[in-house]
Image (cartoon, rainbow, N blue to C red):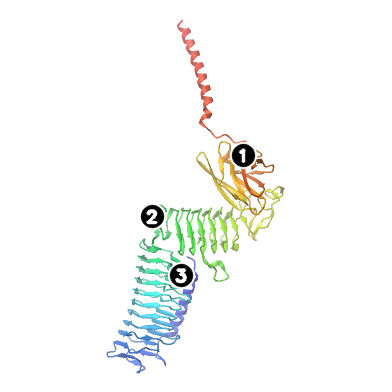
Amino acid sequence: MKRTVSNFIIVLLFLGLFAYVYTASPVKAQTGEIVINPDGSMTPLTANITTSDSITYALTDNCYLPIVVNRSNIIIDGKGCTVQPSEDYTGFSLTGVNNVTIRNTTIKNCLYGISLSSSSDNFLSDNNITGNHCDVDLYSSDGNIMSGNNVTTSFGYGIALTNSSGNLLSGNSVIANGVDHGPGIGLYLSSRNTLFGNTVTENYQDGISLISSSDNNTLSDNNVTANANGIILDSSSGNILSGNKMAGNKYDFGTTGMNYIDASNLVEGEPVYYLINQSNILISPQTYPNGVGYLGLLNCDNVTVTGLTLTRNLQGLLLESTNDSRITDNNVKANYYGIDLVSSFDNVLSWNDITTNGVPSLFSDLDDFGFGIGLDSSSNNNTVVGNNVATNTLGISLESSGNILYDNNFTANGIGVRILYSSFNKIFHNDFINNTQPTSLWHSTNTWDNGYPSGGNFWSDYNGTDLNSGPYQNMTGSDGIGDTPCIIDSNNIDRYPLMAPYHTSTVARNSTSYVLGIVSNSKTTTLNFNATASAFSFNVTGTNGATGICRITIPLPLTESANLGKWTVTINGTQSSYPSVTTDANYTYIYFTYHPGTQTVTITSDSAVPEFQPAMLLPLITLLMLLASIVIKKRAMKTKRGWI
């Protein structure tokens, strides 16, 4: 998983926590503090805390000094009073103590509300911890219980566990924290903790995040709503999730790694499917009728995902170590990462609508802000074809080799295609239209065309001319390809940029479908194909009064004709006198121009082999029957003579 902005800032907060812990330990009495000493006495003696047995302590009034706890095995009952030192101090500091209970206290406007360092088996219950820089902080503290607390409106994180294990957080309300970044509940390098039945809502960053080897934790029956992110698991494994409900978050859920997440978890009321070691399955609205709130595939192969709407998660669709699968005809929108492939090979992503993924740039550098499609961590030899990739922060992020990208539409993205340290990819017949930046390449060398006459990509910012043709663009006559290359950088060149957007149309002959490529600056209707006459007909509608250009790429098996000069192009019934026809081993390319406006175009192959029809056999059958009749009569006459 990529490092998101929120997780990056969480790490900074935790690093700040380390500095705080190291400077605060060991805790000693200072002027302006209330200290419960190891022997049970208190400093100063005038503190508004009372005890009769040095075990149970009770606040007698609101307290405006920080409270330092150096004694184990005690109970501190706030009796509904408030602890409110200045914002430079911690409300309750516990360092190296065990079995301390803090309950029924309001702690507000502090640097940290409650801080536990190397302190275990403590119990924090029914406290109102609010408005602090950070509300509750556990560092190297194990086996503690937090239950029934209201943890609200901190400027940083609500509850943070760092290098802490075996803690239980249950029934807490964690609301509206992280104004200056930080999660509602964040675990960092923390394992074997249990989060049960917490309400985590309206936090400014992650509701619940587990990052950096926070392994083997259990999250169950938490209600995580209306946060920037819901539940995020990053670089953490072995976690068990069940019965959690996520809704109304900007991005509800995201994970990577070997975690165990069953369908009792809900995203926007629909089940989470995190499938591990699955093969030969179909995932569609028909096979998953209860809907799909989130879909991740780990260590799977030969999976088909089709017809789904995947939205509002950290990953719209995650493929991790998943191979030989097909992702087709899905609507993937408004996620941070649209379709994310991690260490996944030989997959096909086709005809998906991938829009508005990523986030608006908060800084000038767009590179860290989500994408429509990601091929990451050596996700090699995948095919990306026919997708509409529009209005994403990054259209596609490529950190892999040997992939083929063709027939895709990259429109109005922040960056159309970003390639980092990746070579030997082939990218052609794509449309790069009105992206803020068409490409961003770092230390990468790739192929950006399919040779001549097939051509390269359409670039809306390419301003070359098309007066010539041929592999070297030195022959007179236009061919729909720019006369000069499109220079991307010194190592990446589109030698044959297309002069108009590229799209495809499918026609059938003898139950076989054929894909025709169309390069045109006009809108075109679907092609109709007359198999008998080998004729194509369609309408074109030009815009802005410009002369229309069109190039049709026809597979040779479709017309069974490779003869140059045997093609006729008529426009509104008038034969065009200047079509350009070129062939290679597999295709015929027909280029022509037309006047602005709506035109009806018909292209006919004069040398086509006629389509077989059963009626064609009737004359042959009649002739054969006549010949057979003659033979039979002659034999009968010979036989008759033999008897005479």
Residue 551: x percent and y percent?
A: 63, 47
Q: Which residue lies furthest to the top in this view?
A: 644
Viewer-proximal residue among 95 and 640 = 640
Query: Which residue of the protein is positioned furthest toward the left in this rendering?
Result: 53
Nearer the observer, 387 or 261: 387
Q: Which residue bears the numbered disc 1? A: 604
Callout 3 secondary element: loop
Circles 1 and 3, Cβ within 8 Å, touching? The answer is: no
Q: In which quarter of the image is residue 222?
A: bottom left
Q: Which amino acid does label 1 sit on?
A: Thr
Badge 3: residue crowd in 10 Å (few <14, some 14–19, many ≥20):
many
Helix, strand or loop at mark 2: loop
Say whether residue 42 is left or right of residue 506: left
Looking at the picture, which amino acid does disc 3 mark?
Ala
Query: Mark on residue 34?
Result: none
Sequence-wise first label, 1 or 3 = 3
Residue 289's label in the rendered image is 2
Q: Which of marks 2 and 3 is nearer the N terminus?
A: 3
Residues at marks 1 and 2, CA–CA distance in whole angstroms: 47 Å
Callout 1 crowding tier (Cα within 10 Å): few <14, some 14–19, many ≥20: some
Q: Which residue is drawn at 46% across and 55% down?
A: 323
Farthest front residue? 597
Discs 1, 2 touching: Cβ within 8 Å: no
Name the mark on residue 228.
3
